[in-house]
Image (cartoon, coloured by chain):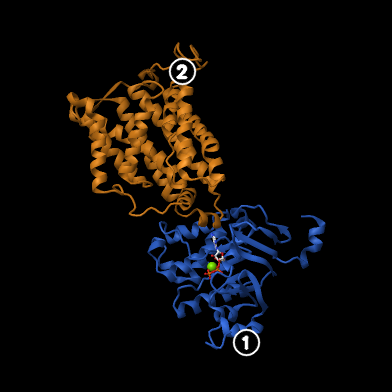
Chain colours: A blue, B orange
C-alpha cells in the first residue's frame, strides 16, 4: 500500500459509484447514478420494478459493464475486473431470485460460499454461526437445496453469501416471496449483521421493512436517483409514502 | 467362446465406452457443448502409449523409423500418455473453444470448431506416423501372464486389466466430483455459471480442469484399447468416439452414472452378438440405442429438463 493511499484512507468510502451509466443494447438501465457507502453502513436501494436496482448491484459485481462513469472499491477502480475478482476483494452478492445450487446439498452450498477461503478453522466457525442464525438450515444440512421451500432457499442464499466473509454484502430483494413473519425474521438477521459491523447495500421492494433497519436510503426511478436521505427522512417523505410505502393509495399524481 | 470371457469382453468394452463418454460429459456439463475432438485425443493417447513403450514409427510417415531413446514399461507409459493427452486437450480448449466463448458465439460453432480440431489432429497423426496399424506387445506388461484363470475359465489378462483400470478411474472420478471441493465447484459451474462466479469460482479454471481430466481419460482409454486390440490406424478412435456419443445420449446427457450405465449396456450388447453375426455388431449397438431413446428420450438417467445456457 502506498503512503498516499494510507493518508487518503480515512476519507475514502468503501464503495463509490460516480455517474454510473449502464446500457443493455438500446435500453439504458442506469443514467448517471452516484452512490457512496462508508464502512459499516447499511444503505437501502428502493424503486419500482425496472428502476435499475438489480442492474446497480450487477454492475458493482462486474456482471455487467459500465458504459460510462466508474465504480471505486477502497479507492481503486473496479473497471475491467472479472466477477470472481470482486468476490476476492470482499464484495459479496446475494443475487435476485436466490439462485441456490439446487442439485447440491445445503452443506455443499455453504461450503462453496467459502470457495476462496483457505482458513479451515475460520470456515468451520462461520458455518456454525450460519447454522445459529438459521437453525432451519442446520436441520436440513444433507438435503438438496432444490428441495427447500422458497423461504429456506432465501436463508441459504444469505447464509452462503456470508460464508465468504465479505466486507460488503449486496443483497437483492432478500424478502421477495417470503411470508410476513419470515420477512421480519430476515430483516432481524440483517439488522444483527449490521450491528456486528457488516457493510450492506440492500435492494428492496418492501420499503417499510428496509428503512426500518437502514441508516440511509436511495430511491431509483428510471435509472436515476430520485430521492436520497437518511432512513428517517425517507420514512417521513410524503412523496415516497404515496408511491412506495403503501399508504395514500389513489392520492398519487 | 465361454460365457465368462464373453461377459468380460462386454464389461471391459463397456468400461472403455463409459470412460470415453465421461470425458464428453465433463466438458458438456461445464460448456453445454459436445467436444468432437475427444475421439482424436483418444487416438493420440494410443499412439503416445505406443511410442513411450519404445515402439518404432512405421515407414510411411514423416517420423519414419523414429524411436524414443528409452522404452518404458506399460504401467508408466499409460499415465504419461494420459498426461500428454491432457495437455493436448488443454491446447484444443485454448484454440478451438476459448476464442469462441470470449466472443459469446453460439455453442454450435464450438461443436464445429472442435470437430475441425479433431480432424486436424487425426490428419497430423497420419502425416507423422502413416496409416499403418501398430500393436502394443503384451510383453510390456512385465511379468504378468497372458491369460488368467477366473472361475475355472481362462481369460485374457489384458481384458481384466482394462476393466480394472477403467472401473478404478470411474470410481475415483465420481468420488472426486461428489465429494471434493473442486468437484463441487465444477458442478456449480455446470448448474449455474453466473452464481458460480458470484461465489468466486473461476469458471475458466473449471473449464480447463474439465478438459484436462477428459483428455487424461481419453488418452488412458486409448492406450488401454491399443493394448487390447491394437491400434488400427489414425482413424481408429472415430468408431469408439461415435459409440461413446451414443452411450452418452443413452445414459442421459450430463449424467455421470448414466454414462457408466450406458457404457455397460452397449458394451454387453455388442459382446453378446454371436460370432457368426459379427458384421452386425454396430447395428445391434445402435439398434439398442434407438430403441431406448424412443422409449425414454431424456436417456436412462437423464434429468427430465436440461437447463443450459
Ligand atoms: N439482460 C437485460 N437485457 C436487456 N434489458 C435488461 C436486462 N436486464 C435488465 N434490463 C432492463 O433494465 C432495466 C432495469 O432492470 P433491473 O433488473 O435493474 O430492474 P430492477 O430495479 O431490479 O427491477 P425489479 O424490481 O423488477 O427486480 C429494466 O428496464 C429491464 O428491462
Ligand atoms: Mg431486480
Give the residue drawn at x 58%, y 57%. A25
Cα distance between the residues tagged 2 and 1:
83 Å
Q: Residue A222: x and y, percent?
A: 60, 70
Q: Is residue B104 above or below residue A123?
A: above
Say which mark, if any, is on residue A103.
none
Classify the position of ligand 2 by quadrant: top left, top right, bottom left or bottom right.
bottom right
Seen from the viewer's position, the closer of residues B280 and B228 is B280
Helix, strand or loop under label 2: helix
Q: Is residue A56 above or below residue B74?
A: below
Residue labelled with disc 1: A238
- Rendered location of residue A229, percent (x, y): 68, 79
Q: Is A60 or B221 nearer to us in this picture?
A: A60
Instruction: Please name which of the two marks, 2 or 1, marks the residue nearer to the observer.
Output: 1
Left or right, residue B140 beside residue A116: left
Question: In this figure, which residue is indicated by the disc labeled 2?
Answer: B129
Residue shown at 38% from the left, 36% from the top: B20
| Chain ID, mark 1 | A
Measured as percent of width and height from the top left, residue B125 is found at: 46, 22
User: In screen coordinates, is B284 left or right of A94?
Assistant: left
Q: Quadrant of residue A66?
A: bottom right
SS label for mark 1: helix
Q: Residues within 10 Å of mark 2 (few under 14, many from 20)?
A: many
Looking at the rendered image, the quarter that the N terminus of chain B falls into is: top left
Residue B8 seen in render: no
Label 1 near label 2: C-beta < 8 Å? no
User: On the image, which quarter does residue B284 sit in?
Assistant: top left
User: Front-most of A230 and B136?
Assistant: A230
Place of residue A219 in the rendered image (x, y in percent of width and height, measured from the top left): 62, 75
Amino acid at each position: 500500500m502506498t503512503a498516499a493511499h494510507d493518508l487518503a484512507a480515512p476519507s475514502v468510502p468503501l464503495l463509490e459509484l460516480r455517474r454510473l451509466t449502464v446500457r443493455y443494447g438500446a435500453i439504458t438501465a442506469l443514467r448517471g447514478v452516484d452512490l457512496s457507502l462508508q464502512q459499516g453502513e447499511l444503505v437501502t436501494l428502493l424503486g419500482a420494478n425496472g428502476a435499475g436496482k438489480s442492474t446497480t448491484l450487477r454492475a458493482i459485481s462486474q456482471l455487467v459493464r459500465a458504459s460510462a462513469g466508474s465504480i471505486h472499491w477502497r479507492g481503486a477502480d473496479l473497471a475491467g475486473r472479472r466477477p470472481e475478482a470482486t468476490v476476492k476483494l470482499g464484495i459479496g452478492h446475494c443475487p435476485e431470485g436466490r439462485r441456490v445450487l439446487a442439485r447440491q446439498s445445503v452443506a455443499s452450498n455453504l461450503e462453496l460460499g467459502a470457495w476462496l477461503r483457505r482458513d479451515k478453522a475460520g470456515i468451520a466457525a462461520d458455518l456454525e454461526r450460519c447454522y445459529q442464525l438459521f437453525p432451519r438450515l442446520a436441520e436440513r444440512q444433507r438435503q438438496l437445496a432444490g428441495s427447500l421451500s422458497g423461504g429456506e432457499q432465501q436463508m441459504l442464499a444469505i447464509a452462503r453469501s456470508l460464508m465468504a466473509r465479505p466486507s460488503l454484502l449486496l443483497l437483492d430483494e432478500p424478502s421477495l416471496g417470503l411470508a410476513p413473519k419470515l420477512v421480519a425474521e430476515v430483516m432481524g438477521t440483517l439488522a444483527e449483521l449490521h450491528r456486528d459491523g457488516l457493510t450492506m447495500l440492500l435492494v428492496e421492494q418492501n420499503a417499510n421493512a428496509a428503512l426500518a433497519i437502514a441508516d440511509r436510503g436511495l430511491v431509483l426511478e428510471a435509472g436515476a436517483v430520485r430521492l436520497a436521505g437518511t432512513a428517517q427522512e425517507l420514512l417521513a417523505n410524503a412523496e415516497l409514502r404515496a408511491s412506495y410505502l403503501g399508504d395514500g393509495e389513489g392520492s398519487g399524481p | 467362446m465361454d460365457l465368462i470371457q464373453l461377459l468380460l469382453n462386454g464389461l471391459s468394452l463397456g468400461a472403455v465406452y463409459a470412460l470415453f463418454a465421461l470425458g464428453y460429459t465433463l466438458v458438456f456439463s461445464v460448456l453445454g457443448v459436445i467436444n468432437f475432438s475427444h475421439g482424436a485425443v483418444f487416438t493420440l493417447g494410443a499412439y503416445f502409449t505406443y511410442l513411450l513403450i519404445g515402439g518404432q514409427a512405421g515407414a510411411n510417415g514423416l517420423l519414419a523409423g523414429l524411436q524414443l531413446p528409452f522404452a518404458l514399461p506399460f504401467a508408466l507409459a499409460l499415465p504419461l500418455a494420459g498426461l500428454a493427452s491432457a495437455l493436448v486437450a488443454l491446447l484444443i480448449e485454448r484454440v478451438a473453444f476459448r476464442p469462441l466463448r470470449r466472443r459469446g458465439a453460439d455453442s454450435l460453432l464450438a461443436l464445429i470448431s472442435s470437430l475441425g480440431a479433431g480432424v486436424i489432429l487425426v490428419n497430423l497423426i497420419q502425416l507423422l506416423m502413416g496409416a499403418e496399424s501398430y500393436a502394443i506387445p503384451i510383453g510390456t506388461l512385465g511379468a504378468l501372464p497372458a491369460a488368467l484363470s477366473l472361475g475355472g475359465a481362462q481369460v485374457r489378462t489384458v481384458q481384466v486389466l482394462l476393466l480394472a483400470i477403467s472401473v478404478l478411474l470411474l470410481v475415483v472420478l465420481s468420488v472426486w466430483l461428489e465429494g471434493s471441493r473442486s468437484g463441487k465447484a465444477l458442478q456449480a459451474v455446470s448448474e449455474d455459471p453466473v452464481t458460480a462466479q458470484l461465489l468466486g469460482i473461476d469458471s475458466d479454471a473449471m473449464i480447463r480442469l474439465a478438459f484436462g481430466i477428459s483428455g487424461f481419460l481419453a488418452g488412458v482409454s486409448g492406450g488401454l484399447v491399443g493394448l487390447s486390440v491394437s491400434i488400427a490406424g489414425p482413424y481408429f478412435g472415430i468408431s469408439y468416439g461415435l459409440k461413446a456419443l451414443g452411450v452418452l445420449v443413452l445414459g442421459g446427457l450430463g449424467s455421470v452414472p448414466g454414462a457408466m450405465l450406458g457404457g455397460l449396456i452397449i458394451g454387453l450388447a455388442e459382446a453378446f452378438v454371436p460370432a457368426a453375426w459379427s458384421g452386425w455388431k454396430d447395428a445391434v449397438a445402435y439398434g439398442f440405442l434407438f430403441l431406448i431413446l424412443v422409449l425414454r428420450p431424456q436417456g436412462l438417467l437423464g434429468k427430465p429438463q436440461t437447463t443450459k445456457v
